[in-house]
Image: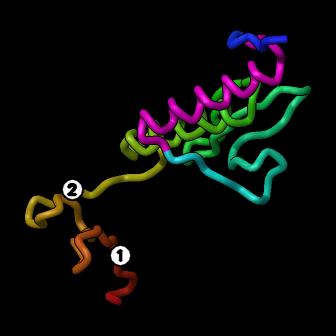
Amino acid sequence: PLESDNDCSPLSALAAVKAEARVMAEAEGLRLHLSSGTSTGYKGVFKRSGRFEAVFIGVRGDIHVGVFDTALTAAVAYARACVAAAAQPVSEADGLRLHLFDKNPTGYKGVRTSDSGRFEARRKVDGR
């Protein structure tokens, strides 16, 4: 018998979902966070009642990202949450106070550009 190109078995559907999730992650430039310390293989992804929950633990506390059919789609959602969290500036609502300083090229007191081009923050305590 000839095999159909339209295989609708659960295994082929799962493979299609995984392939689509990989394509989405790659197209969006996302980095999936692999973890050998979780049973799913992805950081922030947990198996619950046969489905996969993505939970992002950030500065502002735990963020429930969602529940998904596969660990891979949950990992993509987790990666999106990481990007979104990184795009949000720290504010006084986080219990932090930024010290603006117009005489510093970075615009902040105690922050300088290191030789590598990255930023470095220093704080003196008791004059040291």
Residue type at mark 1 is: Arg
Secondary structure state at the residue bearing disc 1: loop
| Rendered image quadrant of residue 116 | bottom left
1 over 24 or under it: above or below: above
Give whichever of 44, 124 is nearer the camera.
44
| Rendered image quadrant of residue 64 | top right
Does residue 54 appear to the left or right of 102 in the view shown?
Answer: right
Is residue 80 highlighted in magenta?
no
113 over 91 or under it: above or below: below
> Do labels 2 and 1 touch, CB within 8 Å?
no
Give whichever of 55, 109 is nearer the camera.
55
Badge 2 or badge 1: first in the primary sequence = 2
Q: Which residue is mark 1?
A: 123
53 over 69 or under it: above or below: below
Q: Residue at x 57, y 35 (%)?
A: 22
Q: Which residues are magenta?
A: 7-30
Q: Position of residue 109 (x, y in %)?
A: 23, 66
| Disc 1: CA contacts within 10 A as few (<14), some (14-19) or many (>=20) | few
Quarter of the figure that contains the N terminus: top right
Q: Position of residue 5 (x, y in %)?
A: 68, 13
Residue 40: mark in rendering: none
